[in-house]
Image: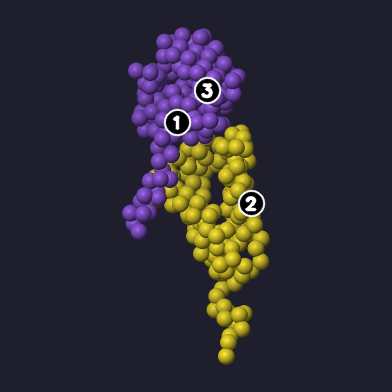
């Protein structure tokens, strides 16, 4: 009875654990052409070629890949290109599509930091702290240093 | 001598609903709410819930998360057992309505608010059940 309950809870929690992946994954159901464009964007992203990455991510979105990772990564590139307001709007879209998205909250906090809005960054930190302690640790360091770029792409290493 | 049905269950408070006719209808959402409430209260999902409430700007996110966890846990028990069925079904329907409007709408219907809508409709139906059905 008890082990049955444990198995049941594990089955329920498993998709949650799987979903708590990083920003490089594509959810099921996205068209293959959109996935291809997203993956091409990721390659440019890792190479820090922001303008080319933007092009590919936008192509992925245009091909019907309206998934949170695409908005999140596109926002990241826009922030790197200095378009912080646009980045903030895109992060908000990513979060609307998936409210429990620690990386998007982390990056949104960094975008606010880049804009000089420390209060908003701290508000997002409060959310990240409850979702991912490691991410929160890095974000806290970035806020303390007032450096939005501090350790902001650990997944690319 | 047989006891009339009405006398037979006189010892039950009027809030009880133990009729088997709606059992399976109650069991589905009952299990869902019970487990989600359990996870929010005891299963480590409290912080996730607070984070969600902070994200959608629900005031007093911390106590609200405990409250919603308790509502789902006790409400799930109520749906399964039939005790205080209608008031809890009504509360859970309101909660699902709020979840759709506040959180799920931007995510679209398929893969978004479809599940909450099913729960909302089933709970609404249960809330309007006549007594002892």
Question: How far is disc 3 from disc 2 in space, using C-alphas?
Answer: 35 Å
Residue identified by numbered label 3: A32
Residue identified by numbered label 1: A102
Q: Nearer the viewer, residue B96 or B126?
A: B126
Is residue A92 shown above or below B24?
Answer: above
Q: Check if mark 3's residue and mark 2's residue have beta carbons within 8 Å.
A: no
Q: Residue at x 38, y 18 (%)?
A: A156
Query: From the image, which quarter does the N terminus of chain A lie in?
Result: bottom left
- Single out the mark in the foreground, 1 or 2: 2
- Subunit that carries the residue with mark 2: B
Question: How far is disc 3 from disc 1 in space, using C-alphas?
Answer: 26 Å
- Subunit that carries the residue with mark 3: A
Mark 2, other Cα within 10 Å: few <14 / some 14–19 / many ≥20: some
Of the chain colours in the picture, the one used for chain B is yellow
- Single out the mark in the foreground, 3 or 2: 3
Residue B14 position in % (x across, y down): 59, 72
Query: From the image, which quarter does the C terminus of chain A lie in?
Result: top left
For the colour purple, the matching chain is A
Q: Check if mark 3's residue and mark 1's residue have beta carbons within 8 Å.
A: no
Residue A18 placement: quadrant: top left
Residue identified by numbered label 2: B121
User: Which label belongs to residue B104?
Assistant: none
């Amino acid at each position: 009875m008890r082990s049955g309950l444990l198995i049941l809870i594990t089955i329920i929690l498993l998709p949650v654990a799987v979903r708590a992946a990083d920003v490089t994954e594509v959810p099921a159901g996205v068209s293959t052409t959109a996935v291809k464009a997203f993956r091409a964007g990721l390659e440019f992203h890792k190479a820090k070629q922001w303008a080319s990455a933007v092009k590919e991510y936008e192509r992925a979105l245009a091909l019907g890949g309206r998934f949170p990772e695409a908005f999140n990564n596109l926002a990241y590139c826009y922030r790197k290109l200095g378009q912080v307001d646009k980045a903030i709007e895109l992060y908000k879209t990513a979060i609307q599509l998936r409210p429990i998205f620690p990386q998007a909250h982390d990056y949104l906090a960094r975008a606010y930091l880049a804009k000089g809005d420390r209060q908003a960054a701290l508000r997002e930190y409060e959310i990240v702290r409850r979702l991912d302690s490691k991410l929160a640790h890095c974000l806290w360091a970035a806020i303390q240093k007032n450096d939005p770029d501090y350790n902001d792409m650990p997944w690319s290493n | 001598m047989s006891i009339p049905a009405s006398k037979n269950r006189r010892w039950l408070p009027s809030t009880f609903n133990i009729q088997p006719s709606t059992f399976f209808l109650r069991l589905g959402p009952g299990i869902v709410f019970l487990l989600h409430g359990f996870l929010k209260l005891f299963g480590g999902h409290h912080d996730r819930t607070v984070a969600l409430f902070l994200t959608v700007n629900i005031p007093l996110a911390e106590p609200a998360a405990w409250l919603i966890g308790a509502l789902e846990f006790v409400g799930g028990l109520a749906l399964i057992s039939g005790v205080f069925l209608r008031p809890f079904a009504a509360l859970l329907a309101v909660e699902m309505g709020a979840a759709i409007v506040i959180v799920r709408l931007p995510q679209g219907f398929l893969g978004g608010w479809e599940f909450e809508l099913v729960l909302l409709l089933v709970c609404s139906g249960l809330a309007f059940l006549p007594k002892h059905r």
